[in-house]
Amino acid sequence: MSLRFRIATVIFILEAVMMTAVLWKTLGHAVESSGQQIKATEQAALDIVSNIGRVALLNEDFDRIQGYIEALTKNPNILKAMLVDERNIIVASSRFADLGETLPPLTNSGTYHWSTIELSNPAGRLGLLAVQFSDEARLRTYREALHRGVAIAAVGMALIAFFGVGFGYLLTLRLERLVHAAEQVSAGNYNVRTSLPGHDEIARVGTAFDNMTQVIAAERQALADANRELDQRVRHRTRELEEANREHKAFAYAISHDLRAPLRTLSGFSQALYEDYAEKLDDTAKDYLSRIRNGAQTMGELIEGLLKLSRISQVEINNEPLDLSALADELINELRNQEPQRDVAVAIQPAIQARGDRHLLRDALANLLGNAWKFTARLPRAQIRFGSEQHAGTTVYYVQDNGAGFNQAYADRLFTPFQRLHHAREFPGAGIGLSTVQRIIQRHDGAVWARSEEGRGATFYFTLHSPRPQGEHSTG
C-alpha cells in the first residue's frame, strides 16, 4: 500500500471512530429521551386508570370502570387492559370475553410488554390493574435513529474518504519527487536534484537531500582520486614488501648456512684441539677452549631461536579444535622424564578446549611450562598450575608457578628477544622463548601478558582469537 493510501486510511479510521462515537452518543441520547417520554405517557395512563379502578373495586362498581378500560384500547399504543379483584378474577377488561376469568400469566414479547399496578388501601390488597402496551413506537424510534445514523455515517465516510485520499495525494506528491531522486542516486546519478519549493518539513528534507547528493558527488570524486593514489601506493608497497621478503629469506638462509658453517668449524676444531692436545695445554688454555665451545654453543642456540621466530612469522596457521589440557599434560610428562629427581606438584585443569595451530600452540605451552619448570628448580616443593578463567566474556589461559619471579617494573622487557631478567648463570637460556610465545599468540590474534613479584612466582596469561579483556592492565 502506497503512503498516500496509508495516510488516507489512517485519517479515515480516526474520523470514522470519532464519527461513530458522536453518532452513538447523539442518537443514543435521542432514543433514550424518546423512550423516557413513552414510559412517562404509559405511567400517566396507568396512574389515571388505577385511581378510578381503586374506587371501582371499593364500591364494586365494575360497569363504570369497564367503560374506562374499553376506552384505553382506542390508544394505538395500548393493546389490552384488565382489572382483577383480590381473588385474581377479571372484573373489567378491554375484551368482554375475559370477564369472570382468572388472570392468566402475563408474558412479554419483542413487540409488546405488560405494565401492572397493585391496587390497595389501608385495609389490604384490592386487586391489580394490568395494561399491555405496544412496543411499536419504541421500535419505530430505534429504526428511525438507526436509518438516520447510517445515512449520516455513509455521507460522512464518503466525504472523509474523498478528502483523505486528496490530502494523501497532495502530501505524497512531493515525496514522490524525493523517491524518484533517491532512485536516480541509487542508480549512480549523483547530479540529480529535487528542487522542492516551500519552507515546510518536506521542502527542508528535499534541500537536505540535494545538499547530501552534492557532498556525496564531491566525496566520490575525492575517493576516486584517493583510490588511484592508494592503488599506486599499494603497488609500490607491494614491491617493497616483496623485496623485504626476499631479503628476509636471504637473511634467514645466511643465518642458517653462512653463520652455522663457521660456528661448526669453530666448535669442531676447539673440540679437536681439546681432545688431541689436552696433555699439552695448561688449565688456563683448557678454560679458554671451554669458553670458546660454550660461546659457540650459545651462538648456535641464538641462531636457532632467530630461525624459529622467522619460521613462525611465515608458517600458515591451521586452526583446529585442541585439548590444551592434554598438550600440557604431555609436556609435563616430558619434563618429568628429563628430571625425574625433581619433586614438582603440577595441577592441570581438565578439558580446556581451544582452536588453533597444534604445533605452534604446543611450542608456546612448551616455553611457558618449561620456564615455570626452570624457575622453580631451586625450590624444595615446586608448584605449577595450568588453567583458564573468564574475564569480561573472554577466555583467559594462564600458567602459574611459585618460582623466582621477577620485578614487575621490568616486565616490558620480557617479550623482547635476547632480553633476560635473570643472569644466565642462575637460569640458563637464550632469551628467545617468550618472544616465540608472543609471536605465536599474535599469529592467533590473541594477547599475552604477565604478573609477578620477585621471589613469589609468576603468572603468564594469554588469549586466543580475542584481545586482552578490559581491566587487564598488566604489562606484556
Image (cartoon, grey):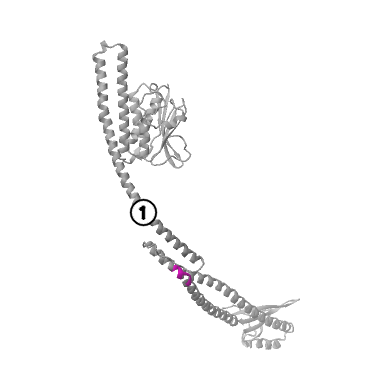
Above or below residue 270? Residue 118 is below
The quarter of the image holding the C terminus is top left
Depth order, front residue of 158/176? 176
Badge count: 1
Residue 460 appears in which quarter of the rendering? top left
Instruction: Determine which residue is flagged by label 1.
Output: 225
Above or below residue 306? Residue 72 is below
Q: Within 10 angstroms of label 1, few (less than 14), some, or many (20 or more) residues?
A: few
Residue 69 appears in which quarter of the rendering? bottom right
Q: Residue furthest right?
A: 122
Q: Which percent across, then down, holds residue 351?
A: 38, 37
Above or below residue 206? Residue 361 is above
The quarter of the image holding the N terminus is bottom left
Residue 439 visible in the snapshot? yes
Q: Which percent across, then down, holds residue 102?
A: 63, 81
Q: Secondary structure at mark 1?
A: helix
Depth order, front residue of 33/450? 450
172 inside magenta stretch? yes
The overriding secondary structure of the stretch rendered in magenta is: helix
Above or below residue 55? Residue 287 is above
Span colored in magenta: 170-176
Depth order, front residue of 291/110? 291
Q: Which percent across, then down, holds residue 143?
A: 56, 80
Q: Which percent across, then down, holds residue 321?
A: 34, 40
254 inside magenta stretch? no
Depth order, front residue of 363/141? 363
The amino acid sitting under disc 1 is Asp
Residue 129 visible in the snapshot? no
Residue sitting at 46 percent across and 26 percent down?
454
